[in-house]
Image (tube, rainbow, N blue to C red):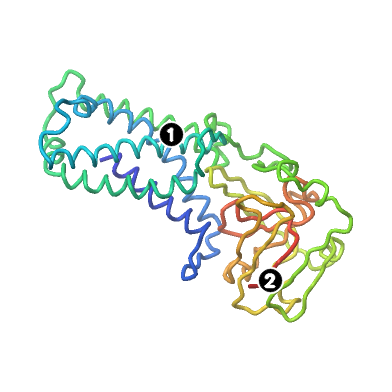
Amino acid sequence: MALGVSFGTAFITGLISHFMQHPPDWLHWPSRPVNLYRVTQGLHVIGGLATVPLLLAKLWTVYPKLLQWPMFRSPAHALERAVMLLLVGGSLFQLVTGVLNISYWYPFPFFFTVAHYWTAYVVVGALIIHIANEWTKARRTVMRKPNDALDRRSLLLSVFAASGAVTLFTVGETVSPLARLALLAPRRPGLGPQRLPVNRTAASAGVTATARDPNWRLKVTGRVQRELSLSLDQLRAMPQHTVRLPIACVEGWSASGTWTGVRLRDVLALAGAPADTRIRAESLQIGGAYNSSEVDPRHWRDPDTLLALSLNGEPLALDHGYPCRLIAPNRPGVLQTKWLKTLAAQ
């Protein structure tokens, strides 16, 4: 039952993350509340880690059945075993690759995001079939008083204690006041340039020289009344606004910063961009899965969406996107494009 709730939660929050990063044309995510993605992705990753003890305990209690012989007693039994193979194999695949992903270690040859997304459907489908097949037996077993040597209460308390410990020592990567307890987290709030973590540095993105170019300009092109080419000094001369927004990473960690810069809607209004246009924010970074992002009207019209020029009261650090980066409410960190060069109205 606990695994069903855990896997269901992971599936729903995983879909939210996927469709925030790759929204279809008919789906427009709201910009408020500003911490929505921080909560859902934190729940996805931290809840996924807490699932590891649950799954191990479940496999420990049923592994004799998984190894029973003969392997197939009938066509119906063969189908049941095939579903179980998909469920067990897919579950282990999801948790193992998920842990490797948040650890930033990719020893496998496939793209994690695609494999993780599609395997989730296989696991949930197999789980639904398994629940339907075992529902009567499970309900009867749960309601029956156990008489095993290791009673059910002790087992459950041990497993939930292990899951609770994993949660306690990870949740600080999302809940900043508990950051000191985040012993299992790959990133901790407050650690990094300007007190904010960094996933990709300017050096790893190959933009160190182009970002420091004194002739850098931000271009606004596409479906606008007038194209713009703005220098850093011109952006600084425009009305500045300060907001407090988080960087919420797909790997589960999140940390808030105080950002100052020009409202994106002010720059687009200066260019005469239509109110319904979608903006493509392009980075100086060449190549990579997230060297650009789409900003829909609900986000670029939000007053908290900035072309950030400073962070926590200091000029923007190179690794945080100098000379100019996008910061917007309720967006995954990979879509908060750094080292901006072009805003193209679609």
Q: How many marks?
A: 2
- Image height of 89 relative to 313, above or below: above
Q: Nearer the viewer, mark 1 or mark 2?
A: 1
Q: Quadrant of the C terminus?
A: bottom right
Crowding around mark 2 (Cα neighbors within 10 Å: few <14, some 14 to 19, many 20+) is many
* Residue that extends furthest to the bottom in the rendered view of this protein: 225
In the rendered structure, the answer to whether residue 120 lies left or right of residue 140 reads right
Q: Which residue is mark 1?
A: 96
The answer to whether residue 90 is seen in the rendering is yes
- Which of pointers 1 and 2 lies earlier in the amino acid sequence? 1
- Image height of 315 relative to 301, above or below: above
Residue 192 % position (x, y): 69, 38
- Element class at badge 1: helix
Residue 84 % position (x, y): 24, 38
Q: Which residue is mark 2?
A: 265
Disc marking residue 178: none
* Residue occupying image coordinates x 54% and y 33%: 182
